[in-house]
Amino acid sequence: MDSIIKKGILRFVIIAGFCFSQLIFALEDEALTQQIDNIKQLDDVSQQIDAYHAIQTQHQLSNEQTARILHLIGANYAKISQLENAIAPLKRALLLTKNSRKRSDINRLLGLIYYYSDQPEEAIAYYSKALAFHLEHNAQVKAAHLENNIALAYEKLNQFSRALDYYQQAEPRYVEYGTKQDVLDVKLNRAGLLAKLGHNYKAVEIYDDLLNNHYHELDEDTQFLTHSNVAVSLNALGKYNRAIKHLSDAKAILVNKDDAYHLASVELNFADSYIWLTDYHQARVHIANAAKIGKKLNNPTVNFSVAYHLSRVAIVLEEPEMALEQINNAIDIAKKTGNKQLLQKAYSQALIIYGANNMVSQAYGVRKQQQLVNTEIKQQNLKERLAQEQAFEERNQLETRVTELEKEKQIQKLAIEKSKQQRIFFIVAGLLSILLIVAAQRRAHERKAKKQLEVIVTQRTQELQKTSEDLRQASLVKSKFLANMSHEIRTPLTAIIGHSEAMSNAHYDLRNFNKDLAIINNNGKHLLDLINDILDISRIEENKLELDISTFNVSGLIEEIGTMFTTLANKKNIDFYIINALDDDFAIKADQFRLKQILLNLCSNAVKFTDKGSVTLSIRETFTGIRFNVIDTGIGMEEQQLEEIFDSFTQGDSSITRRFGGSGLGLCLSEQLANLMSGSISVTSEVHKGSEFTLHLNVEKSKIAKPITVAQRDDKAIFEGRVLIAEDHDDNRELIVRLLRHLGLEVVAVENGAQAVEECKHGRFDLVLLDIQMPILDGIGALKQLQGSGFTQPIVAITANTMQHEVLSYLEQGFADHIKKPLEQENFISTLRKYVSYDSKSRSHKAINISNTVDTGDLAANFAAGLEREKAAIKSLYSNESWEDLQQALHKLRGAAAMFKYHSIEEAADYFEKALKYNDKEAYSEALEGIEYALSSSQKVV
């Protein structure tokens, strides 16, 4: 009894002590709060910081109280812009406090400090921690604020795709839970980012909505930003007059504001609009205004833009020294700031200036530097894409964790409620209830055991049924295999035996000897290939096929395949394209023979099953290896055929076997070889539209020396001389330049007739090639000026206008000859032979073979990459009813499409151009739909 009393007294003392300590802490917290409130009344923030430091040193504070004081110190340092001093106390507060809400507030404040300290990666890290807390506690508005801040930080890092992702998450939260101003702000941010990503139509839609429907709800700063930003997007869309109007509105808002940076930006945007409107003198006025402001600001971005725009105007106004000086200033500024996008932009302008001034060596040097910058940007984009995928995975994990926490809370609540009910039940029911529960549990256990037994029986029954079905299928496969083997072997054997018996006949006609011998030989080779395929499949299934791994150059392998299938495709009157996105020295570590075996099989099938259109072999690097795509426009396959296509002896149906031949082993073997090399093959197809086979290999990548090909030898002995080419389309011009240089000619390239006339004044040329339709001065105008100046060398028209009356008209006006687009090698070579010196020992076919080695894969890829931009430009010209400009743009597009064999685009552009030429307005709408469809579908193929 005494021990029980002692234990009771001890428990009472412990409980009383705990309550007393909690009371003391509460009184201390109340006193600390009063001191903090008194300090907050001080007007000077520096005095407040000193007072908080005094509390920290003079009082014995708990960890949570110390964290509270440190948080206030850090926040006050941030108020007076002493950001570096704010970081240390805030980080220490994070270590001391266990309060998750306070940690969230500190993380958010650290994010803001790092953002304004130009450390966006650190800012994102702290913002993300705060965001996780608010998502977990369903604080939608605060979560949206943090998502908006994270997006701004990613914009600073030029990771625009990730920034757009966070804006798109924040906007619906603001719409549902935030204020109207929050919604307007995030829309403005998102529109600006869309413009940076090149989605200018979407950006203009958002800006128009803000200006037309919410203008009076915006403050002056937001009004200015909206006018200024929409002007930039309108310039990108070619709507320069509208852009100038918005820039005028933006400038009017800045009149009474001390905001030199934004005023300089507006002046530069004015200059950009007037440059596109070819009002270069007005553009120079606005550039001068921006230069004055930039001189005071000493802002690198403004100074870069001033130098860049001055170089653009100077080159057009024929001030080459000014253009070179300013573009070199721009390059220096971009290098100092480390901004690769600006540096890439400056290099592009420098190339134009050097090209216009015939400074070839300088242009080559700048081109090499630009390629290095392009490589760095590509690497950065890859890193960004990887980081985006990682962030996406982390966000999914976070959302999953939040959902799990919610479920755990609900389960805990249910568990607590259940516990209460059970306690009440036990108290009321007593022993009888306990007995009833035990009995119920026994019955439940018996039912559960019975159900488990039923499930086990059902599973075993299903397994037996599946085993039986597998055995039946195996028997069917064996029978099918033997039947197919019999058929496949009998067919060539029948031909061999039949023709050999005929040859042994006494009355055999010896004139058929070579033909019959070839039939026997071909069927024998077919039998050998069939048996080799069967043996390969057997060795793979028995794990006895060994790979011969070596390091080899992929481009060399692709060249072999291209040479083989170009000939086969030409025999069927179809096109065979290769799009090789790999570097020349790109190499992999794999079994070269087996990889070639797979690609030969895929390309052979594609050519075999394609009667019209084209077959394309595309090669690209992936994160884990290399990917090959074989795309054809052939007969295609149905869904059921796709499911069985990789089975042995399988083709689409019996009619396909009769029509095209083949054993059906190729794809089965190819898939197994791909799997053996840690790869895979997949297929998509649509009946009557074609198929696409994708081979992906997870292989080791390496670099080896670029292989020596025919294209690298010295073939300057074929032609000798100096040629001028005037062509307004960049890709066409580069293609013709490469071809001419590959044949040994010295080439000068310009983009319009006016530049061609100037070059002929200052240089000697053996031959001049003029495109007919060009901006500023067309080919016929250039011809007239050259004839008037006494130029006597031959001038040849090079154009897509090939009607007989058009060709006769060119010759009558003084052109020496005519070359049509797309270039036909024999015609092109024979025309060159008329007007420039060549090696008399060489033959045309040698020059044609050499010209066929010119690598134009990158030009075709560039053309394909620009199709979306071409579509936007055509739609813009159509919307503005700029019919003359639209006709020129379509003619330019038609010529380029013909050169790169995009026949659907060529036909659609030709139809639209003729409708404009003959003023057939009823056909305009149909023609626009046709060119849009052609551009979109061609883009998907590439």
Image (tube, rainbow, N blue to C red):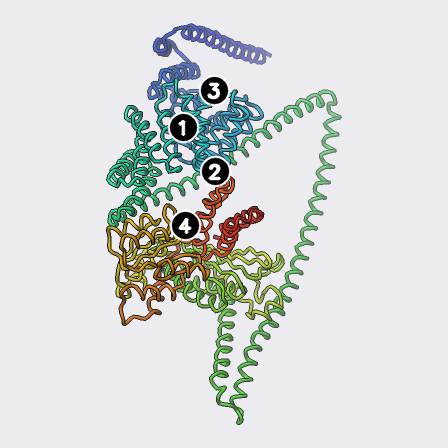
Mark in the foreground, 4 or 1: 4
Residue of label 1: 123
Give the residue displayed 53% in from the left and 25% down from the top.
Answer: 183
Give the residue displayed 52% in from the left and 20% down from the top.
Answer: 217
Element under disc 1: helix
Mark in the foreground, 3 or 1: 3
17 relative to 315, above or below: above
Q: Amino acid at mark 1?
A: Ala
Query: Marks 3/1: CA distance?
Result: 27 Å
Residue of label 4: 862
Q: Amino acid at mark 2?
A: His
Mark 4 neighbour density, 10 Å: few (under 14) some (14–19) many (20 or more):
few
Marks 4 and 3, the one that precedes in the sequence: 3
479 relative to 857, above or below: below
Mark 3 neighbour density, 10 Å: few (under 14) some (14–19) many (20 or more):
few
Query: Marks 4/1: CA distance?
Result: 37 Å
Quadrant assignment, res 419: top right
Query: Residue 696, how many percent across, how many down?
Result: 47, 54
Mark in the foreground, 2 or 1: 2
Residue of label 2: 199
The N terminus lies in quadrant: top right
Farthest residue toward the bottom?
A: 506
Marks 3 and 2, the one that precedes in the sequence: 2
Mark 2 neighbour density, 10 Å: few (under 14) some (14–19) many (20 or more):
some
663 relative to 228, above or below: below
Give the residue displayed 28% in from the left and 61% down from the top.
Answer: 744
Query: Residue 708, how many percent across, how many down?
Result: 30, 62
Q: Nearer the viewer, residue 887 or 503?
A: 887
Callouts 2 and 4 close, C-beta under 8 Å:
no
Quadrant assignment, res 897: bottom left
Dot label at residue 219: 3
